[in-house]
Image (cartoon, helix red, strand yellow):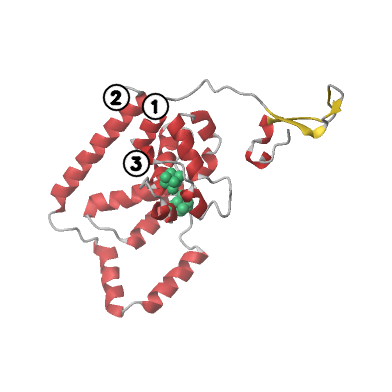
Amino acid sequence: MPIHEESLIRPENLRKHEELNIDNVDVSGHWSTFIETRSVADYNENLEREISAFPGGAYIHRCWQCGACTNSCTVNAINPDFNPRYWIYLARLGMEQELLRDKEIIWQCVSCHRCTHVCPRDVEPEGVMKALSHWLEAKGHTPKSQSQHFDEEFYQQILETGKIEEGRIVRNFFNRTGQPLKQPWLIRMVKNLIRGLPIMLMFKMGLSTLFRPKTKDWSKSKHSIEELIEMRELERKKILEGNEAS
Ligand code: SF4
Ligand code: SF4
């Protein structure tokens, strides 16, 4: 029987016989296309729990597979292999090895939030994509991504001062990732920005860059946030090691 949705099946799972005759019926070529039988024996039954332990992944269990996230996805429009719905499906089933086949593209989510906006179940798929990327890194499947470097820079600055200063984040991010600061797109963006900003605001921004003001009484909040981060990291570690009390 011909397979109408052949494009959805990985080429290595397809078997074709250039010449095949069954009971005197010629089924050569396209007519003898079969899908390789397979059985999955390496489920990770803890996978959904592992991913939901990372920031953004908490609501993965709500997904009912409608596909609205993938249909609205900015990256999927460019690369059909980028498929949030499918990755959520694999994570919920515990198919870790299947998920790992796409590990080089999962981090490419551009955080545009379109999927989260359309999701009828409040899964927050954008958050799940972040959780998946962080899970891949934590399990050693991928190196630390650029997006993770950016997040670390962001929250370190919040921890230190209770504020964010965009210029410093961008500078430190380029530093961390070994990229030159003089990027043509960045120069263009800054020029356009400066053109529309009032002089006083630019002056204040310049002062903030030099003196790094802190939020008043920040040290107490900083301490609580650090405690929370530490607690969550410990919980996550236990879940990843399979030692959590369920
Ligand atoms: S839109 Fe929401 S419910 Fe639908 S497949 Fe995506 S994550 Fe699941
Ligand atoms: S946030 Fe990421 S997954 Fe969601 S639509 Fe945008 S690129 Fe796609």
Q: Nearer the viewer, mark 1 or mark 3?
A: 3
Q: How far apart are marks 2 and 1 (CA)?
A: 11 Å
Judged from the image, the secondary structure of the residue bearing numbered disc 2 is loop
Tag 1 residue: 46
Judged from the image, the secondary structure of the residue bearing numbered disc 3 is loop
Q: Which residue is drawn at 38% across and 35% down?
A: 51
Q: Position of residue 189 (x, y in %)?
A: 45, 69
Q: Nearer the viewer, mark 2 or mark 1?
A: 1
Tag 3 residue: 59
Q: Where is residue 155 in the image (x, y as percent from the top left)?
A: 30, 49
| Marks 2 and 3, the one that precedes in the sequence | 3
Circle 3 packing at 10 Å, graded few (<14), some (14-19), many (20+), is some
Circle 1 packing at 10 Å, graded few (<14), some (14-19), many (20+), is some
Residue 51, visible in the rendered structure: yes
Tag 2 residue: 244
Q: Distance between the residues labelled 1 and 3?
A: 15 Å
Above or below: residue 153 compared with residue 36: below
Q: Dividing the picture into quarters, in which one does residue 194 lie?
A: bottom left
**What is the quadrant of the N terminus in the image?**
top right
Amino acid type, residue under disc 3 in the picture: Tyr
**What is the quadrant of the C terminus in the image?**
top left
Q: Distance between the residues labelled 2 and 3?
A: 19 Å
| Marks 1 and 3, the one that precedes in the sequence | 1
Amino acid type, residue under disc 2 in the picture: Glu
Q: Where is residue 238 in the image (x, y as percent from the top left)?
A: 31, 26
Residue at the right extreme of this rendering: 24
